[in-house]
Image (tube, helix red, strand yellow):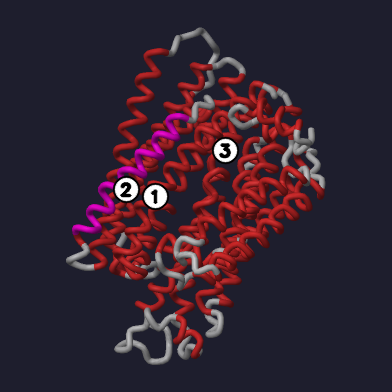
Amino acid sequence: MSGSKQTFLRGALILLVSSVVVKIIGAVFKIPLALLIKEDGMGLFISAYTLFAFFVLASKGVSIAVSKMVSASVSVGKSREADRIFGVAALLLGVIGTAGAAALYLAPAEFLDNFVDLRAVSGIRAISPAVLFVALISAFLGYFQGKQNMIPTAVTDVIEALGKLAVGLGLAWLFIGTSTAGAAVGAIAGVTFSTLLALIFVVIMFLAGKRRRTRSAETMRSRKSIAKELLTIALPITIGASISSLASLVDMATIMNRLQTITQVTPEFIQKYASLIDGNLFQGGIYEQLANQLYGLYTGYAVQLFNMPLTMVVALSTSVLPAISGAVARGDSGSARRTTLSVIRISVLFAAPCAVGLSTLSAPVLKFIFNVTLAHDLLRTVSIAIVFVALVQVTNAILQGYGRMHIPLVNMLIGCLVKVAVNYYLVAMPHINIDGAPIGTLACYFTIAALNIICVIRITGCKFPLGDFIIKPGVSVAGMGIVVVFARNLLSAAHFPERLAVLPAIAAGVLVYTALALLTGAVAEEDVAMLPKGGLLVKHLKKLHLLKA
């Protein structure tokens, strides 16, 4: 395995470990929060957070551009130029972050009323300073990632998660006695506090590293030239991310508004959502508070669990961009292609069992984590999209690493238009209603993934054998799905504690999937070699004839 690939995999592993820790902390934060503030409060929390996420999109684009440019400079020995790139980016993001924070805080309630329940306005203002904090953090993390140092990113994520847990959950519990909206504001305030702590940390890390850096004589580009390239790279990425996030905003407004166009619901709807319906407000149709609760049910339960398995994919995509950018800058096309094939194969092998497992066990998983099952149909459908979201994440990073910034932009636009159209049509249908939202998500990411894969093949020349990338993982995951369902039913028939039965079913699924993936040859030798002590593991698996080169 090449040194660059080892660095990429080491970085991905660091991010993976931190992401697992973050997800655990996040679960400790979000699960009690959902139980505390219920569907209505989660709707308000997610509404404020979604607007915040939209306002930090420019930071993401510049951060990726910094990572790409710093990686290219470092790969050809220009360390001082890498420092100058960071300086220009920090100034640019400071201006963008200040403007974004001010705009979010000062946004009039009349404008926000088009997107959210007005009770979410206080939460939106509470989170507005975090726009500036995240913008500055992004400059530092882009610099570190460009040098393929993923430790600051990993630690920053953990700090943010702990800050939200300690402050956000504490304030939500403190304010729940006043109102649900007040508790949601408290939870949102925890996000602002956590980003401030993370900013302090990355500043300390940068200053400590600056004292150790040596000065060398080298020719550097002007700051004007660097700023121009930063914007050239960042703008398509930002616009693409904006389209995706804007679709979430439009999605939020569409779901709320389209649900409220339903004037007569079906008996099945009344029976299913009886616990949410307020008899004093219900007149046969879906009123605003019920629409907000349905939206909170989808985003606060189904989408939260849907996002959890994508931990590894985010780690891979973050680490793969500077690795491919550096290889392309050196003219090492072979290394870039090998990294491309590796990251896509690993993503499929990881995402497929997560999608099938979460879909087949949607009700038991919700019961185990939240002690509710009302969102199980929503989770069952949206979980299938995990595979396509994983492919979108890594292929976007691959295309950006090759310098094709406009391609993810165009493909994201097409996919998001599909999502909005599907949601707009399905959510307003009385017999589908909120169940149309996950269908829109599935259609959106399937479209983007398919378009991205086609573009990756054309640009890189990589070939993706049907057997290795679809048939073998498909057989493995199908066998796993059968075993998971059988195990769950068997445990239920044996009167195993209902809420705990999901754990042995998942364990059985993991064992069966691993065995089938090895027996079918879905896992290649180089995939295993990437793991800690991978060489020793390869040796033992070959002795058992469970691994093919």
Q: Which residue is mark 3?
A: 233
Residue 17: % across, % down: 49, 37
Q: Give, as a three-letter code, the residue at label 1.
A: Gly
Residues under numbered marks 2 and 1 in contact, where contact means CB atoms less than 8 Å apart: yes
Circle 2 crowding by C-alpha within 10 Å: few under 14, some 14–19, many from 20: many
Q: Earlier in the sequence, mark 2 or mark 1?
A: 1
Q: Position of residue 481 (x, y in %)?
A: 66, 60
Indicate yes or no whether the magenta region holds residue 187. no
**Is residue 522 rendered to the left or right of residue 117?**
right
- Whether residue 468 is visible to the viewer of this picture, yes or no, is yes
SS of the residue under disc 3: helix
Camera-side residue: 363 or 541? Answer: 541
Which element type, helix, strand or loop, lies under badge 1? helix
Q: At 58% across and 29% down in the image, what residue appears?
A: 532
Highlighted magenta segment, given as a residue range = 151-174
Residue occupied by mark 2 = 164
Q: Residues within 10 Å of mark 3 (few under 14, many from 20)?
A: many
Q: Earlier in the sequence, mark 3 or mark 2?
A: 2
